[in-house]
Image (spheres, helix red, strand yellow):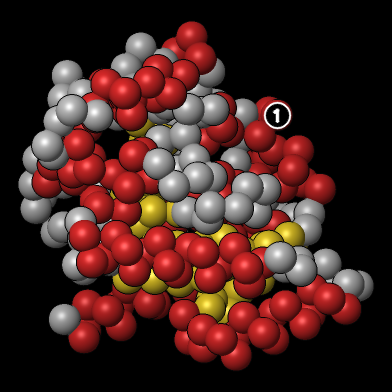
């Protein structure tokens, strides 16, 4: 069965994008799904957060974009059962220049994913992007079924969201007509903050059922986990952050069943 391809994206930095990619992938794997995480951010934080250090990145997403290696060849297992990763290296910083003259430069990743075929060994492919609209992000959006948007519960959240919605519309009209907003995940929620509660109300009013019911709390264990090269579910399964990502994964599975029924 064809995997669901989701880009985890937000043009605003510091919203929990990479944290969500790592921990949602781990939570999906914990309930039986097979997940491939493609790290397209030159900083490689998703790779580090899954315990793949720089010295262990012999192959990377850069090799895939250049067509020098297939996704299956570049993917490597992680310490998380049922989670593989195509890691990122700083080489990605030069991808825009390297691919600039190629006619299919926006569809490199899409072509690589299509080569996995309908019997791909993954049920979900999650793509972690840099917090900017560049050729890497456009490649991810061109290859995806939908965009999963982490949205921090703070004052400028809606401004960043409106920018992303415009970007999705541009990509839909130019390189991927089937691209949709898959869902919005509210992150870094502090219940003591009245403004955070107001942001949640505003976002739900604006986007309705596109917003997941699960809200990811601000949690110190979630912040600590990457420094140990682990998703928070492996670092501290019982903490509030881990439990929230497990609930989010369950919601994703439910959403997937509804989408398949509609198809």
Q: Is residue 171 left or right of residue 195?
A: left
The residue closer to the viewer here, 67 or 255, is 67
- Mark 1 nearby-residue class (10 Å; few <14, some 14–19, many ≥20): few
Front residue of 71/134: it is 134
Element type at mark 1? helix
Residue 92 in percent (x, y) is at 39, 24
- Find disc 1 in the rendering and name its residue: 227
- For the point 47% across and 80% down, which residue is it? 210
Q: Which of 179 and 47 is in front in this view?
A: 179
Q: Residue at x 51, y 64 (%)?
A: 163
Residue reaching furthest top?
55
Q: Can residue 164 be seen in this view?
A: yes
The relative height of residue 215 versus residue 26 in the rendered view (above or below) is below
Q: Nearer the viewer, residue 238 or 173?
A: 173
Up-down relation of residue 151 to residue 116 (above or below): below
Task: Count how many numbered circles sit on residues in the image.
Answer: 1
């Amino acid at each position: 069965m064809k995997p669901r391809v989701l880009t985890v994206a937000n043009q605003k930095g510091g919203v929990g994008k990479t944290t969500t990619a790592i921990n949602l992938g781990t939570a999906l794997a914990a309930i039986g799904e097979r997940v491939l995480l493609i790290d397209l951010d030159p900083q490689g934080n998703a790779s580090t957060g899954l315990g793949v250090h720089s010295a262990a990145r012999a192959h990377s997403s850069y090799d895939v974009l250049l067509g020098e290696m297939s996704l299956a060849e570049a993917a490597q297992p992680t310490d998380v059962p049922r989670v593989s990763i195509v890691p990122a290296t700083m080489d990605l910083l030069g991808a825009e220049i390297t691919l600039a003259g190629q006619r299919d430069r926006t569809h490199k990743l899409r072509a690589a994913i299509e080569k996995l075929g309908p019997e791909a060994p993954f049920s979900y492919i999650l793509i972690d992007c840099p917090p900017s609209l560049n050729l890497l992000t456009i490649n991810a959006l061109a290859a995806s079924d939908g965009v999963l948007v982490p949205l921090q519960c703070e004052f400028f959240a809606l401004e960043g969201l409106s920018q992303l919605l415009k970007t999705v519309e541009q990509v839909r009209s130019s390189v991927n007509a089937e691209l949709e907003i898959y869902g919005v995940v509210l992150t870094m929620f502090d219940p003591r903050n009245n403004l955070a509660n107001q942001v949640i109300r505003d976002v739900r009013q604006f986007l309705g059922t596109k917003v997941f019911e699960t809200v990811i709390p601000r949690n110190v264990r979630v912040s600590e986990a990457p420094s140990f090269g682990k998703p928070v579910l492996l670092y501290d399964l019982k903490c509030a952050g881990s439990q929230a990502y497990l609930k989010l994964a369950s919601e994703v599975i439910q959403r997937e069943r509804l989408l398949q029924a509609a198809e």
